[in-house]
Image (cartoon, grey):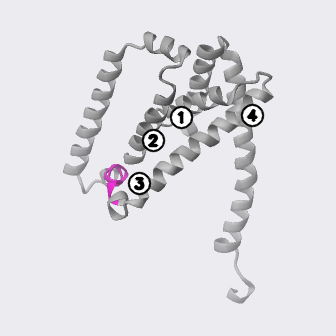
Amino acid sequence: MLIYILVTVVTLLMSLFFIFDDKMMAFYNKINFPYVILFCLFAAVLVFISYKIAKSNRENKLSQYYILFVSNRKLINKNKMNLFYTVLTIISGITLFSVRMYISFGIAGSEISIYHAFLIGIIANLSFFLSFTPGGLGVKEGFVAGISYLLFADAGIGVVASLIDRAVNLLLTLITGIFSIKILDKRFFSKNPEEK
């Protein structure tokens, strides 16, 4: 849970770089901030209550996994450099996603600036926190479509660019997955002739 919170905080802090962009100011005017704050408070209370319930039922296997998931602070308390490496990993992930969006928009036939690619990367990174589907399927595409509608008045190009990015990711996953399965099979499952 701590990692999710860190991703959200770092992303929000990086988004402050774009806070005075004209398009973003128009976007901020459309947001109903009391509802956003109410939603965040409700989510925080829900997490707190579920954590308390899980702590009171420690013998339950599901509660044990939930407590382990929420209690990532031990990882940071053990070594303070872990926080630095975690933040560095988050920033690297946002930068990599921004570069991928820049390339994907170019493939989709819409050249965008590095500035806009970085803006898309930062805001779309919030889909990591709101991933209700496996791999954020559909959530990331929705974020990118919404941002491209806000920036370029064309949501379709955002969906196409996001789907291009998703297809390339799927292809890379298949390629690296095949090699990983072969390596794992050799290492753990294939029997050596000496063992027979």
Instruction: Point out the tag, 4 or 3, that comes first from the N-terminus.
Output: 3
Marking on residue 7: 2
In the image, 176 versus 34, the foreground residue is 34
The residue lying at 68 percent from left, 38 percent from top is 99
The answer to whether marks 2 and 1 mark residues whose Cβ atoms lie closer than 8 Å is yes
In the image, 52 versus 190, the foreground residue is 52
Q: Residues within 10 Å of mark 4 (few under 14, many from 20)?
A: some
Magenta residues, as a range?
65-74
Answer above or below: position of 182 versus 133: below
Q: Is residue 83 left or right of residue 169?
A: left
Question: Label 3 vs label 1: CA separation?
Answer: 19 Å
Residue 160 sits in quarter:
top right
Question: Label 4 vs label 3: CA separation?
Answer: 30 Å
Magenta stretch contains residue 71: yes
Magenta stretch contains residue 2: no
Identify residue for label 3.
Answer: 83
Q: Residues within 10 Å of mark 1 (few under 14, many from 20)?
A: many
In the image, 101 versus 143, the foreground residue is 101
